[in-house]
Amino acid sequence: MSAHETAGDIVTAGMIVIGDEILSGRTKDQNIGYIAEHCTTIGIQLREVRVVADVEAEIVEAVNMLRVRNTYVFTTGGIGPTHDDITADSIAAAFGVPIDIDPRAMAIMTPYYAERGLEFTDARKRMARIPEGAELIANAVSNAPGFMLDNVIVMAGIPKVMHMMLDDVTPRLKTGKKMLSVTIPLHQPESEISALLGAAQETWPDVSMGSYPFFEHGKYGTQLVLRATDKARLADAETAVKGELESRGWLEG
Amino acid sequence: MSAHETAGDIVTAGMIVIGDEILSGRTKDQNIGYIAEHCTTIGIQLREVRVVADVEAEIVEAVNMLRVRNTYVFTTGGIGPTHDDITADSIAAAFGVPIDIDPRAMAIMTPYYAERGLEFTDARKRMARIPEGAELIANAVSNAPGFMLDNVIVMAGIPKVMHMMLDDVTPRLKTGKKMLSVTIPLHQPESEISALLGAAQETWPDVSMGSYPFFEHGKYGTQLVLRATDKARLADAETAVKGELESRGWLEG
């Protein structure tokens, strides 16, 4: 599939986390889980994530790989004012378009610094560099905008700022059928229920069945998760699986 | 560079997080940050991370891409007993080697279940499937082993289990020069210090300089981080940068 084409009602996304600080372990990423959950909620399937260093060639490679095979690509990180913030330039390079200080960004940022009596330094103007053809994404927290170029959505790495940008861009995104899910908590370890679950998966190929072990108070338990876009099929599968669990005395409550 | 070759004393790693539950946002990954920090501590540079779905072709693609361009690849997730745990089979496919129930794994697991009066079911035996040529990695928490095949280290996704496996495998890894770092906390926003930092980076090309903004009590601050493998060069750069900061009245305490 080429960019923007999707199979039926399925809308997919890739995500790229940009930053040496994540790879060194200095900063713990909080954005993957947030964007993953947001995508699921609005009906976009997050298919793949990459964490890459602050190296233009690596950012370009990841952007160009993911943007052709997903409806959207979200990036976080690397759009600040310092020398190692190279995301905007790397996105321009990936698309082969020019990048320069953008008058729309300047119009937003100039009064912001003026009102605060702060100098609009060259470093701050660096944050107004936007690739040609991009739409701006508002930043209600700290003003400097993100942007969306074609299907690539470029956001800040600071979680609080990223959340606001994601809220701003979300209404512009097309979304697909929502993935619905049912979770069934069990006190059995995963290895006890796997045969039952494997058989159920064969019977219900259109309902994705997963099991997620947890370890609590020295004992293993399992969360069974059934996922499907068709509500009726999901309900039927849930009834069938719960029946199987009940017949073995494994269903809680 | 081919697999295992490294530039001088640099040892690199890639990481692959395997699991639909991370991409759906249902489970929040805790392993990237842990492994990143562990690698930095022992002198391995984590260069790239991918999160991929429980799909064999995608796991194989990621493994084969990352294993040839890094000294090591760490994987987490997908080695449990259920039908969607396909990591071991996917690693075997990536290397083109057979996979079967491993007598060494059986020797570890059989007494474990016997002592607990639990049946060693087919599902549990699935966790004894190990690709040919792999070395086992001990699992002191829940018994079923991980493994290391060539330069690929395959571990559980449950953080507690992964930590034990990482401890077990670490003494077998070669490590490079440790990346040393110095952090300088500042109350200035990143955009104030970026010019100073950019100039310092040009003067000290072998000392990587990064700035990480934070937002606290309604104000922006910045952590300056200087990183280098050469202790003396790092100390000299620290002195120089602190001198510049002090002359502007920006150095704390």
Image (tube, coloured by chain):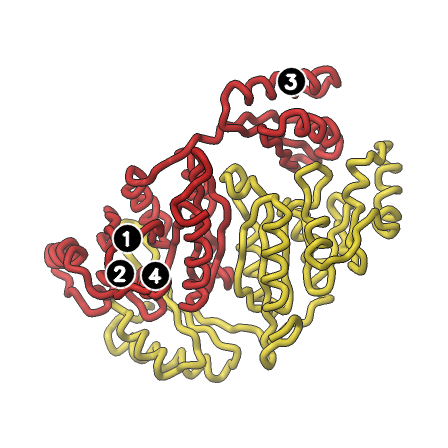
Chain colours: A red, B yellow
For marks 3 and 2, give the CA distance: 53 Å
- Give residue A199's position: percent from left, percent from top: 72, 27
Chain assignment, label 1: A
Q: Label 4 crowding class (10 Å Cα cut-off): few <14, some 14-19, many 20+?
A: some
Q: Read off the residue under disc 4.
A: A95
Query: Which numbered disc, 4 or 3, marks the residue closer to the eye?
Result: 4
For marks 4 and 3, give the CA distance: 49 Å
Determine if marks 3 and 1 fall on one subunit. yes
Determine if marks 3 and 2 fall on one subunit. yes
Dots 4 and 3: beta carbons under 8 Å?
Answer: no
Dots 4 and 2: beta carbons under 8 Å?
Answer: yes
Which of the two discs, 4 and 3, labels the residue nearer the N terminus? 4
Q: Name the residue type under label 1.
A: Phe
- Give residue B141's position: percent from left, percent from top: 73, 46
- Give residue B80's position: percent from left, percent from top: 71, 42
Q: Read off the residue under disc 2.
A: A131
Q: Say above or below: B102 vs A58.
A: above
For marks 4 and 1, give the CA distance: 14 Å
Chain assignment, label 4: A
Q: Name the residue type under label 4.
A: Phe
Q: Read off the residue under disc 3.
A: A240
